[in-house]
Amino acid sequence: MPRLRKPITGVDPKLLIKDAAKLLPEPSRRRFLRGATSLGALALLTGCDIIDGDTSENALRVVSRFNDWVQARLFNPHTLAPTYPESAITRPFPFNAYYDEDEAPQIDGSRYQLQIGGLVDNKKPWTLAELYKLPEVSQITRLVCVEGWSAIGSWQGVKLSDFLKLIGADTSAKYVWFQCAEGYSNTIDMPTALHPQTQLTLKFDNKILPTAYGFPIKIRIPTKLGFKNPKYVTAMWVQNNDAGGYWENQGYNWFSGL
Ligand SMILES: Nc1nc2c(c(=O)[nH]1)N[C@H]1C(S)=C(S)[C@@H](COP(=O)(O)O)O[C@H]1N2
Ligand SMILES: [Mo]
């Protein structure tokens, strides 16, 4: 798979550190930036020595990992993403993927089954008929894409935390991994999976999810960037190892919180 992020020559690691420090609350920020200790601290926190990295791409990766580390610790599982009135919904809602809309996977809903695996008591696969019977929650929230656009949409489905409880998932596990029909994937941390707004989405705008927006299942996470919201989901695994994801593996920040 081709790497997307090319090495950036002439990037000053000191500036990168300043950038990373912006995420830190005071007084840790000032302490972190004081003197030559930052490089050492960064190495300590990320378990990676920035000085050993001879390319600036390496430096970027270290800072990115550091950002993930800080963001995961600043994430408040009780802070809700903003919600909007129906009049604010973006119409038409944009489609986005790493391919054109006419290449989006076409899934036969009558034969579809959501596969369940990993640290879960009941690994029985779920048909759509079964999923549509579960209690429905709704949200009108903003999807923010890393490419520089955002849009407000209306999504309905099952609260992911309820679904995880229903299948007897071990919620002390570290991650939930999602596999998609066309090969896309995402791993999310358990606190995000259990966040009250994280949704196993079956509908857009109160209608069965159209192909463009991920039929039959999208995982809607309004506290994360769009690329951490997998569409065309075919499998969900509860596990302790980080299986990465399509863009995460190409250098995008793993946490990518909003
Ligand atoms: N399976 C799959 N899920 C995906 C993607 C993809 O390419 N494949 N793209 C992601 C990105 S980058 C964005 S911004 C959102 C777009 O969702 P939308 O088409 O509903 O606007 O889907 C995310 N989920
Ligand atoms: Mo995106």
Image (cartoon, rainbow, N blue to C red):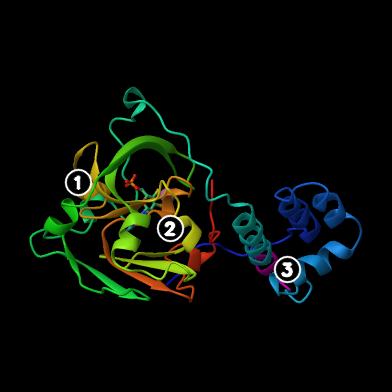
Q: Quadrant of the C terminus?
A: top right
Q: Is residue 14 left or right of residue 162?
A: right
Please, what secondary structure does the residue beneath circle 2 have?
helix
Q: Which one is closest to the eye, mark 3 or mark 1?
A: 3
Please, what secondary structure does the residue beneath circle 3 have?
helix
Where residue 220 sits: x, y (%)? 36, 49
Q: Residues within 10 Å of mark 2 (few under 14, many from 20)?
A: many
Q: Which residues are magenta?
A: 54-59
Q: Nearer the viewer, residue 98 or 125?
A: 125
> What's the amino acid at mark 1?
Pro
Residue 193 badge:
2
Looking at the image, tell me whether mark 2 or mark 1 is earlier in sequence order. Answer: 2
Looking at the image, tell me whether mark 3 or mark 1 is earlier in sequence order. Answer: 3
Q: Is residue 112 magenta?
A: no
Cβ at disc 3 under 8 Å from ligand 2: no
**What is the CA distance from the residue labelled 3 to the residue labelled 1?**
43 Å
**What is the CA distance from the residue labelled 2 to the residue labelled 1?**
23 Å
Residue beneath disc 1: 210
Q: Which one is closest to the eye, mark 2 or mark 3?
A: 2
